Image: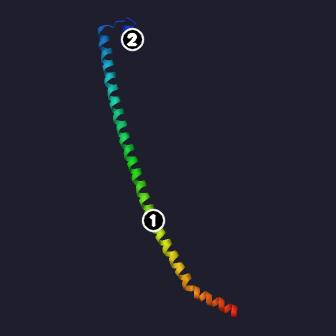
Amino acid sequence: MSELQVENVRPVTPDREALEAISAAIHIRGEQVMQVQHELLEAQKQQDLMDEQEFYAQVHINSVLSFHTHDVCDEVTCCNFKHILYQVIQGLPVIKNQLVDSIII
């Protein structure tokens, strides 16, 4: 409608009414599209937030499991080392006797 005014054209009444109706319909449709886009953006933002929370929860779970697994591994390694060391210490007299016997013979 504003283009016609710029060019100093005045449509006849039926054309003007049709143009006004078309313009109003376009305006209403534009507002509807904007509303849907806004809703989609909000839904995407919420989904991104949920994904981020889920990711950090998984990172936290993995961190806790890794920490506890590391402690268990350290305890197992330490226990295994103590057991092996104990066996070596217990076996030292036997090894000493074998060495002494091999030198004497």
> Horizontally, is 77 left or right of 19 in the view?
right
The disc, 1 or 2, on the residue closer to the chain's N-terminal end is: 2
Picture quarter with the C terminus: bottom right
Residue lying at 50% horizontally and 71% vertically, measured from the top left: 77
Q: Residue furthest bottom?
A: 105
* Label 2 SS: helix
Going 39% across and 53% down the picture, which residue do you hit? Answer: 57
Q: Which mark is residue 81?
A: none
Residue linked to disc 2: 3
The residue singled out by tag 1 in the image is 69
The residue located at (36%, 33%) in the rendering is: 37
Residue at 29%, 9% in the rendered image: 13
Observer-nearest residue: 56 or 84?
84
Within the image, what quadrant is residue 29 found in?
top left
Q: Measured along the vertical axis of the image, is residue 11 above or below residue 95?
A: above
Name the kind of residue labelled 2 in the image.
Answer: Glu
Mark 1 neighbour density, 10 Å: few (under 14) some (14–19) many (20 or more): few
Give SS at disc 1: helix
Circle nearer the viewer, 1 or 2: 1
Residue 69 image point, x, y percent: 45, 65
